[in-house]
Image: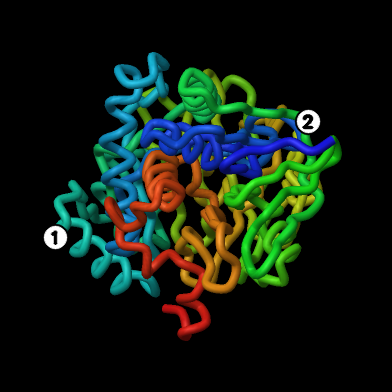
Amino acid sequence: MTDTADVVIIGAGIQGLSAAYHAAKLGVRNLRVIEKEFIGAGSSGRSASMLLLQEDTEDKIRLSQFSYERYQAFRDELGVDPGFKKIGYLSLVPENMREQALERLELRRKMGVRTILLSPAEISALVPVVNVEDVALGVFGPDDGVIDAHAIMQGYAAGARNLGVTIDQGTVATGLQTSGGSIVGVETNTGNIQTAMVVNAAGAEAGEVAGWLGIKLPIDNRRRSIYITDEFPRIPLDTPMVMDSEMEWYYRKEGPGVLMGMGKEQSHQVSLSPNWDYLPQVVEFAMHRVPIFEQAKIIRGWTGIRPLTGDRHPIIGPVEHVSGFINDCGWGGEGVMHAPAGGQIVAECIAGTAGGTFALEHFRLERFAAGGR
């Protein structure tokens, strides 16, 4: 069976759904999202779901500022509460990362982001449970907080459908068809879809999708395991999210328990359970950084994939040699946080107004051919 669509988006994670909604909002019609499993089956549904302004580069700060503003208006726009709770975000910085951290702090302040420099004593006053003996300083973002990725995805999905978008779950993309250097179709397990435009929002599998066209994406998929403890009242409800900058270990409150994450292992598979073999390393560091975690019990968890590029920026936009192919991938675990910005950028690419909100040169794939950053 052959079907038709003006635009096909591969992947119904938060980026694909945001792109669909924003494109439809710009007037794009006959738009179809195909998802091999169900909405949020990939890493979007395995996120620690933080909304942070404490980014490290000018481009990513702008993505965060745009997305932060849009999430504040999300309920009014889409009728869904995005679950934003302003708990704050604290980075713990060792001596060998001091200079870099101070440079990034000044950049944020220059761009209007509230950022507070803390001494070890001030860190202890804010989060007394944290061991600061090997911490040089802290960087605290009081406006950062947690969001609900699942609610946001459902909001975008409903908004897209209300604007005429079709979302096909259980439809597996198996190939792309081209003619004369242009996209002409998508092959799926249920038949072909004739289309002149495809968006690659396939998350951890974005490299495979691009590979159907002979395009190599410089993305390194890294697995992060997230663990949840049982009820643990010794961590108060108003505690900020705490990140160890060197180890990339973090924790925050999750209901009555605590959520903690760590890991950068190469992997392509999301999972409903974490890597239990990795747990001893996580526990060892957790007890070093927060000694009272010795009394906590891990009861469940999951695995998410961080598709990382060399410069830690996403790959967004059309490619030079295949007309009608648009990337929306390589978000490195920040796809949920930056979903409004990513969706807007891709929507403008689809609608033919690329660059209207964000300049594309620092996000396009071709930046790597030019030596990257």
Quadrant in the picture for the C terminus: bottom left
Amino acid at pointer 2: Gly
Callout 2 crowding tier (Cα within 10 Å): few <14, some 14–19, many ≥20:
some
Q: Nearer the viewer, residue 245 or 347?
A: 347
Say the numbered circle drawn on residue 110: 1
- Across and down, in percent, residue 54 comes to 31, 51
Spatial CA distance of label 1 from label 2 is 46 Å
Under circle 1, the secondary element is: helix
Residue 47 position (above or below residue 330): above
Residue 25 position (above or below residue 175): above
Residue farthest along the top direction in this orientation: 79
Callout 1 crowding tier (Cα within 10 Å): few <14, some 14–19, many ≥20:
few
Q: Tell me what residue is drawn at x 47 percent, y 59 percent.
A: 317
Q: Is residue 306 visible?
A: yes
Q: How many marks?
A: 2
- Across and down, in percent, residue 134 comes to 42, 62
Q: Nearer the viewer, residue 217 or 150?
A: 217
Quadrant in the picture for the N terminus: top right
Q: Nearer the viewer, residue 230 or 203?
A: 203
For discs 1 and 2, the disc positioned in front in the rendered view:
2
Q: Nearer the viewer, residue 361 or 323?
A: 323
Amino acid at pointer 1: Lys
- Across and down, in percent, residue 283 comes to 65, 46
- Across and down, in percent, residue 328 comes to 53, 53
Say the numbered circle drawn on residue 170: 2
With 1 as the anchor, is 142 left or right in this view? left
Q: Quadrant of residue 40?
A: top right
Under circle 2, the secondary element is: loop
Q: Which circle's residue, 1 or 2, is located before the other in the chain?
A: 1
Q: Is residue 262 visible?
A: no
